[in-house]
Amino acid sequence: MKKQPDFQVSKARNGPALEVLQQAIDYVRQHPDVDSLVVMASRPGHCIPFATPIDRPLDFIGMLELMKHDLFREK
């Protein structure tokens, strides 16, 4: 398997986003049971989803709702 290069976190505006991507990469590499990933990339005026194939959409929607609940509770 070809090794993906690690992201070099720059001091540019997108540095924090690159840091989060590196954390996701590290997490997936350390947990071989991870079987899917969803990332939303946002820039002014645009939001683009990136996702691995989703086999069970209703389970996925439930997970998103739980995440949304946790985010609102933290705020």
Image (cartoon, rainbow, N blue to C red):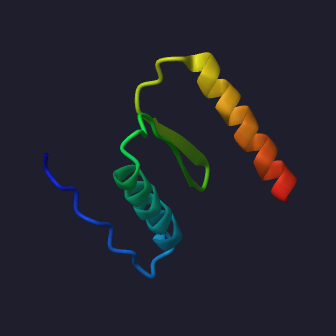
Relative to 74, is 13 above or below? Answer: below
Question: Left or right: where does residue 38 sit relative to residue 71?
Answer: left
Point 34% across, 53% down: residue: 29
Q: Residue drawn at (74%, 33%), measured in percent from left and top?
A: 65
Residue drawn at (40%, 78%) of the image: 10
Quadrant of the snapshot with the C terminus: bottom right
Across and down, in percent, residue 13 comes to 51, 73
Above/below status of 7 relative to 12: above
Single out the residue that lies furthest toward the bottom. Answer: 11
* Between 10 and 65, the one nearer to me in the picture: 65
Task: Report the front residue among 11 and 51.
Answer: 51
Where residue 67 sits, quadrant-wise, is: top right
Up the image or down, 49 lies above or below 14; here it is: above
Task: Give x and y (percent) for residue 54.
Answer: 47, 23
Identified at 61% across, 49% down, the residue is 45
Q: How many marks?
A: 0
Residue 70 at x, y = what percent? 78, 48
Residue 50: x, y in percent? 45, 39
